[in-house]
Amino acid sequence: MIHPFHPLRGRAFRFAVTKQLWGEERVTFEHPQGGLCSVPVGWTDVVPADPYLSIGGGRSRFRVVDLLALADLVAARRTR
């Protein structure tokens, strides 16, 4: 668990499954007190870290992909 505010942060769990639940990709794992628990996949290290967060360290206010999309929108608007 890597989410900074989750009470189980820093602990390792037995992975059960990753699937779409409630409109988002979630990880289901065995809770230490028994039973299964699911959290958004971004709260875990199951997927690689977002480069925007890991490389940028929060220094950039915008993601490159979002800036490129904005540039495309502005260019399309100018041609009208």
Image (tube, helix red, strand yellow):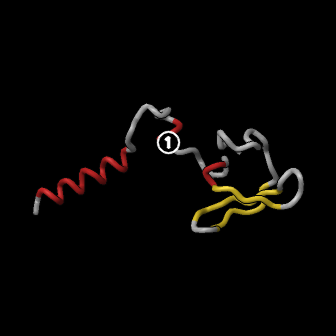
51 with respect to 18 (left or right):
left
Kindly state the secondary structure of the residue where label 1 is placed. Answer: helix
Across and down, in percent, residue 67 comes to: 31, 47
Q: Is 70 or 55 nearer to us in this picture?
A: 70
Q: Is residue 41 above or below residue 55?
A: below
- Callout 1, which amino acid? Pro
34 with respect to 76 (left or right):
right
The residue carrying mark 1 is: 51
Mark 1 burial class by Cα count in 10 Å: few <14, some 14-19, many 20+: few
13 with respect to 66 (left or right):
right
Residue lying at 59% horizontally and 47% vertically, measured from the top left: 48
Q: Quadrant of residue 28?
A: bottom right
Quadrant (top left/top right/bottom left/bottom right) for the N terminus: top right
Residue lying at 77% horizontally and 59% vertically, measured from the top left: 37
Q: Residue furthest right?
A: 34
Across and down, in percent, residue 6 comes to: 70, 44
Across and down, in percent, residue 60 comes to: 40, 35
Residue lying at 24% horizontally and 50% vertically, measured from the top left: 71
Across and down, in percent, residue 55 comes to: 49, 35
Quadrant (top left/top right/bottom left/bottom right) for the C terminus: bottom left
Q: Quadrant of residue 5?
A: top right
Residue lying at 28% horizontally and 52% vertically, measured from the top left: 70
Q: Quadrant of residue 75?
A: bottom left
12 with respect to 63 (left or right):
right
